[in-house]
Image: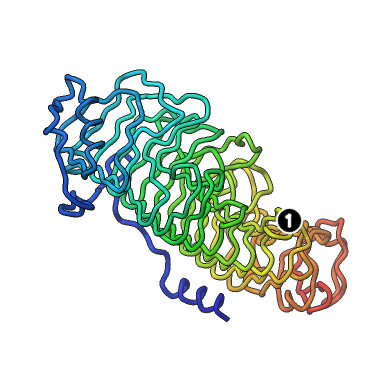
Amino acid sequence: MKRLAWAAALLLAGPAMADMYQDASNAKLPGARVNLGLGPSVSIMDYGADPTGVASSEAAFASCIASGKDCRVPAGTYRLGCSAHNAAAGTAVVGDGATATVLKLSNACVVGPWSVLSAQEVRDLTIDMAGATTAAGGSIVVQLPRTAGPRVERVRVINAAPLRMYLVGLVSGGGATTDPIISHNYLSMASPTTSGTQCVLFSSSGGGTITGGSIDNNVCVNAGMYINATGLSIADNDVSGWNFGGGITTEAAAGSAKYLIAGNRFHDSGTALDVNNTAASGVENWGPDSVIGGNHCWNIGGPCVGNGGLRAVVSNNRAYGVSKGVANGSAFESGNLGSSYNASGTLYAGNWAGDDGSALPWYGYREQVNTFQNIVLLGNDFRGAPLGRIAPANLSVATAIDAASAVGGGASTVAALPSCGAALKHAVKPVSDQNGAPTYRGALTGGGSLAVLAYCNGTAWEAH
């Protein structure tokens, strides 16, 4: 009943649409907040920094962040070197505004494997990577410690070379992270790639646990998110241009559960298959007991929502022009990675799928295997799916599909009709290959060319 209440709330509320941005290149980031530091502060100007960007401010910045106090960086452009910049524990680095304060790396930097900037809080500034590349092992541009309440707010990361570059992430080495906040940032790779790169990286490979917190109202360009956390809200983000994994991927690993993934927009991804031979999906969720609602997807390579998390609610999502990277794909898909990570117990309610006339046809909904238990499809509108609402292959016997979800879409062959049982009773489906004139309420025979209407009486399909 709790899952049904969540779904009803999402259906009534409708999709939460972020209105924080004019477009992907000019984020309308809120102005700088003042007096939000963790304690006493010093200014980079106290150490002789050059705000014109002509002379290097590397030594001044290193002294400022090592002072043990919050480091204030007034408006200006400050040229930095290629080394790691690690602020003293518990301190913040705060600029005068996301477009006013610019930390610019020297040209042709090779960074890592380390962070470009690490602090308890980073706010109100731009980090211009100036095309910097990363050494083997990868680099995190803005790295947060594994503590309580780390945050990145109103930060722009631009001109980052994509391969093995992670724009915001957590330090490795274990430890408990609680209530991290990644909010109102503009995080851009210079170009997409089909291998390891992320806009936000909270991975189990770094050790430790992540509990609570929010990733919200961010713009991610040419890279998606890869997340391992419990009870994390991922909401109202805009993800575009990625070609590796999902726009939001939640990890199939311990500690990954109970997400709220709501009101995000996924659009204009790459359509090439990535190094894992998968197409770019909107949401790829493996966390159990999660709610995925009110998300919008358009012009992407894979499904809008691929769910392999147990007992999830997938509600009120909108898919238009999806699955452009793989034939016979789907807008919504139930995934399977074994007994701990699969879609059994998931409710799909009030989702919508429409076609933009793309070359590769797709279904409204499909299942990767036919062994799922207790999946329910309720009140979905998949009429726009060019191959039909429900993919007949691998459809689990225990999947319950209401008439509204099963009716409509493209015509089926007799052989491709899904199994008619109590879950499909009263469903109606066009059939394109009836052999010979049918008898009203008689059995259907495929292999012909007549178009008829098939009706599920709860036991078998019959001609109507």
| Front one among 416 and 443 | 416
x then y, percent, for residue 415: 83, 59
Q: Residue drawn at (64%, 38%), measured in percent from left and top?
A: 276
Q: In which quarter of the view is residue 388 placed?
A: bottom right
| Front one among 242 and 382 | 242
x then y, percent, for residue 180: 39, 55
Q: In which quarter of the view is residue 273 placed?
A: top right
Residue that numbered label 1 is attached to: 338
Quarter of the figure that contains the C terminus: bottom right
Outermost residue toward the bottom? 1
- Residue type at numbered disc 1: Gly
- Mark 1 crowd level (few <14, some 14–19, many ≥20, 10 Å Cα): few
Image: 218 above or below 126:
below
Q: In which quarter of the view is residue 52 placed?
A: top left
x then y, percent, for residue 234: 44, 57
Helix, strand or loop at mark 1: loop
The coloring applied to the image is: rainbow
Image: 356 above or below 453:
above
Q: Residue drawn at (48%, 55%), measured in percent from left and top?
A: 210
Count of marks placed on residues: 1
Left or right, residue 175 beside residue 124: right
x then y, percent, for residue 190: 40, 30
Quarter of the figure that contains the N terminus: bottom right
